[in-house]
Every structure is written in structure tokens, then in C-alpha cells.
Image: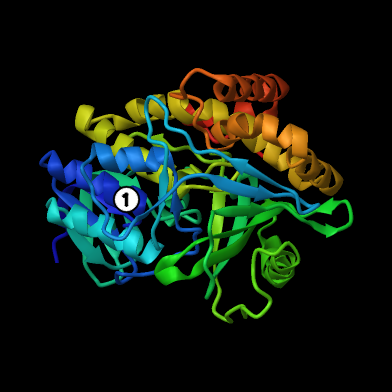
């Protein structure tokens, strides 16, 4: 059977892939949108989308039924003290995010891409199709194949496309693992919890309890594992302990049982160890490592990178990689390089993690820096309005960049944006 021809093959129909397909199809491109799963399907996620993600969807005119606006966030430290991080609008983003179950979000975005003219395929990308050594499509698990001028990899943290195209060095990736469940409880504010596994030994990540679908709460833990993917079991062992912490600080009624159903997923954070584009192959979202290395949110960056990759293809279909990498360098490289290095250093230092959690949630300091913390932690400095919060975030950014300026992580990301994965 002759291969299906497309201008662009998008492998993966999550938020990044669907937005890329939507933008391309609206521009008149022939788009094959391939995903191995039948939709709707679920993903391990906190179900929150930040202000930058909201702005991307607003810019594209995508409306999501059932999305609940979310504003301020609470952070609880190891001593049980809490700080309220305010959510304020900026010049380039609104003063709110939203909560929507991933099964609903991904289904809605995929449907929008199909309605725009993308052709959806349910199959796994199998053997690569080459054209003069260049990746030009895939044979699919259903016995068909798709050949395209440009291939966009949106197939997640463990992207097979990235590996096939030689765009990732797994030993260099800054890995994380998240485990999520839903509980029958209401939550007044999205809440992040930093806690000690033993006294003065901070958990190398955080737990969360967020507003969830149908009046339930989305509850989970995320743990940094660096390059050791066998350490994912740490998250599984920690979920019950985290529920105990929620009971102790009064965020969850002790009568609420934790369901046996749990869903886990890998995070590839900070762009480390991954070349995001080369030639006519582009990686977006988790496949490119575009996950905030400080707090693990990836949907906003997935939406923005999917849009940017599509626009790069539209602007320069013969060589979109340079255009796309320029966007990533301007938009994400500085933040990711500094904070991936900080995240990697903290994961190894349990006492420093414990001390940091106490310091940031101390009554006087916590209140003083809460606005700046919210701006910096959520990567909202670019576009923030003038004021104390912006100044605090700008100072934090300057200190982080100065501390990591000559580090290996920055060199790795700079090299990756030039198309090179440095040797381990």
C-alpha cells in the first residue's frame, strides 16, 4: 500500500501535538495527527494549566467547556506553615489559570485539530521511513504508513521519535516521575506541600492537592530522580506518606480513603539532554523536555511550543529548525538552564531541601516574597507588570543565572539549541 502523503506528520495528539496540528491545518497544510491511544484517554497530571497556557488558547480562539478558573495557590512547608502565592495578570498573560481533567482537555484539543482539517490516525509509530538519511515519516502499527515533508514529535517524555532521530541522550536527561490519584474531597485552593520524609530530610519534590473533576480532588506526588529512572518507585512509596501529611496539616479529612487506582508518568524537565529540532524534525512539549524544572508544569509550555513549531514550519517549511530553536532560546533557555541546574543540585541534598522549604514558608519572609515567588516559580517574569513582585522575581532570576552561568547544564542547553547533544 502506498504511504499516505502529508505536509506534516505530528506524532502524538496531546496538547502540544494537537495545537501544532490545529495551527498547521488552519494554515492549509495537510496534517496527519497520529497517536497510539483511542481518545478520550487519561494522563498522569495535576490537571492545572497556568496563565501562559490560557493565553495561548485565547490567542487561538480555543474555548474549553468545563474549565474552572484557578487563581491563587497555597504552599505548605515542612512545619505546617503556609504561604499564599497570588496569581496576578501581566502584560502578556491573564491573572488566572484553569483546572480541567486531562482526559477532557486532550480530547477537546484533538477534536479542534480534526475540525480544522487534520487527519487523525490511531496507531503506533513503528519503523521510520527515511529519505536520503532524513526522517520522513513512519510505518504505522496498523499496517499503513505516513510520509511527510516535516515530522513533529509530540510523543511525550519517553519520545520514541526523539530516540529514532538521534535527538536525545537519555543519560543526560533530568528525569522526574509523577503519580496521581483522585479522591472524594473538595479543595478550596490549589495546594503544594513540601514535607520531610524524616526530620530535616526533605522529600525531593512535592505533593499536591488540586481542584479536580466532578467535585473531587486531584492528589499526587512528583519526585526528581535525575538520571536514575529506577528511582520512580520512590513516588509510589511516598503517596501514602503524603496522604498522612495532608491529614496532619488538616488539608484532607482522615475519613477520606485513598483510591487504589493510581496513574503514573515520566517528566523530562528543563530541556536537558535533548536537541529540540534538527532539519525538518521538531520536538514539542514533553518530548523536548519543556517542563518547568521548578514546579513540573508542562501543559503551558506544550501549548506554546506546539504553536511555535507550527509557525516555524509555516514561515520556513524547508528549514524550520532554526526558526523554532530561536523561539526556544529566547523564550525558555535562560530559565530552564538556571533552574534545571538548581533542581538537580537540590535533589541530591535532602537537608538543603528541608531548610529551603522552611525558609520559604517562614511567616515573615514567606509573606514578603510571595508575589515574587509566584512570578518566578511559574516562569511569568517576562511580561510581568512593574512592582515589588516583578522586582523580587527579577532579583531571583539574576542570582540563579549568575550562580549557574558557567555550569554544565547551561552549556548542554546552548549546545542542544545549536543542534548538538554533548557527550556524557
In the image, 232 versus 236, the foreground residue is 236
Residue 229 place in picture, x, y as percent: 66, 59
In the image, 306 versus 360, the foreground residue is 360
Q: Is any atom of residue 297 visible in this view?
A: yes
Q: Which residue is mark 1?
A: 17
* Mark 1: secondary structure: helix
Q: Is residue 271 left or right of residue 303?
A: right
Q: Is residue 49 above or below residue 312?
A: below
Q: Quick one: quadrant of the N terminus? A: bottom left
Q: Is residue 230 left or right of residue 384?
A: right
Q: Is any atom of residue 423 visible in this view?
A: no
Within-10-Å neighbours for mark 1: few <14, some 14–19, many 20+:
many
Q: Is residue 359 above or below residue 104?
A: above
In the image, 117 versus 181, the foreground residue is 181
Q: Residue at x 28, y 65 (%)?
A: 140
The quadrant holding residue 3 is bottom left
Residue 332 place in picture, x, y as percent: 48, 30
Q: Residue at x 70, y 72 (%)?
A: 240
Q: Residue at x 43, y 52 (%)?
A: 164
Q: Is residue 15 above or below residue 186?
A: above
The quadrant holding residue 246 is bottom right
The quadrant holding residue 89 is top left
Q: Is residue 371 above or below residue 72?
A: above
Q: Residue furthest right?
A: 199
Q: Residue at x 65, y 73 (%)?
A: 253
Q: Quick one: quadrant of the C terminus? A: top right
Residue 180 place in picture, x, y as percent: 56, 66
Amino acid at each position: 500500500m502506498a504511504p499516505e502523503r502529508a505536509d506534516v506528520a505530528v506524532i502524538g495528539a496531546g496538547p502540544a501535538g494537537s495545537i501544532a496540528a490545529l495551527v498547521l491545518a488552519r494554515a492549509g497544510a495537510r496534517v496527519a495527527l497520529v497517536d497510539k491511544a483511542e481518545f478520550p484517554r487519561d494522563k498522569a497530571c495535576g490537571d492545572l494549566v497556568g496563565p501562559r497556557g490560557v493565553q495561548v488558547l485565547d490567542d487561538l480562539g480555543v474555548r474549553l467547556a468545563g474549565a474552572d478558573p484557578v487563581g491563587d495557590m497555597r504552599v505548605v512547608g515542612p512545619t505546617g506553615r503556609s504561604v499564599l502565592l497570588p496569581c496576578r495578570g501581566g502584560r502578556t498573560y491573564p491573572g488566572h489559570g484553569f483546572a480541567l481533567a486531562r482526559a477532557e482537555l486532550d480530547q477537546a484539543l484533538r477534536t479542534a485539530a480534526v475540525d480544522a482539517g487534520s487527519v487523525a490516525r490511531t496507531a503506533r509509530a513503528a519503523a521510520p521511513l527515511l529519505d536520503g538519511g532524513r526522517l520522513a515519516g513512519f510505518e504505522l502499527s496498523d499496517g499503513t504508513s505516513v510520509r511527510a515533508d516535516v515530522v513533529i514529535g509530540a510523543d511525550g517524555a519517553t519520545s520514541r521519535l526523539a530516540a529514532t532521530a538521534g535527538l536525545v541522550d537519555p543519560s543526560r536527561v533530568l528525569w522526574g516521575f509523577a503519580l496521581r490519584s483522585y479522591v472524594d474531597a473538595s479543595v478550596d485552593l490549589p495546594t503544594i506541600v513540601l514535607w520531610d520524609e524524616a526530620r530535616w530530610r526533605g522529600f525531593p519534590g512535592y505533593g499536591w492537592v488540586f481542584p479536580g473533576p466532578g467535585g473531587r480532588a486531584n492528589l499526587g506526588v512528583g519526585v526528581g530522580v535525575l538520571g536514575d529512572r529506577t528511582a520512580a518507585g520512590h513516588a509510589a512509596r511516598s503517596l501514602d506518606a503524603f496522604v498522612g501529611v495532608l491529614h496532619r496539616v488538616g488539608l484532607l479529612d482522615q475519613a477520606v480513603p485513598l483510591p487504589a487506582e493510581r496513574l503514573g508518568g515520566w517528566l523530562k524537565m528543563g530541556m536537558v539532554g535533548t536537541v529540540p529540532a534538527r532539519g525538518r524534525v521538531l520536538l514539542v512539549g514533553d518530548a523536548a523536555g519543556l517542563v518547568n524544572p521548578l514546579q513540573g508544569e508542562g501543559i503551558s509550555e506544550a501549548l506554546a511550543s506546539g504553536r511555535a513549531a507550527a509557525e516555524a514550519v509555516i514561515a520556513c517549511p524547508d528549514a524550520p529548525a532554526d526558526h523554532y530553536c530561536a523561539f526556544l532560546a529566547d523564550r525558555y533557555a535562560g530559565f530552564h538552564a538556571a533552574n534545571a541546574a538548581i533542581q538537580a543540585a537540590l535533589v541530591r541534598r535532602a537537608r538543603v531541601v528541608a531548610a529551603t522549604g522552611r525558609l520559604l514558608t517562614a511567616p515573615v519572609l514567606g509573606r514578603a516574597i510571595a508575589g515574587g515567588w509566584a512570578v518566578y516559580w511559574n516562569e511569568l517574569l517576562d511580561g510581568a507588570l512593574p512592582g515589588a513582585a516583578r522586582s523580587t522575581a527579577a532579583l531571583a532570576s539574576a542570582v540563579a543565572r549568575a550562580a549557574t552561568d558557567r555550569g554544565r547544564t547551561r552549556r548542554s542547553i546552548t549546545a542542544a539549541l545549536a543542534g548538538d547533544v554533548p557527550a556524557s
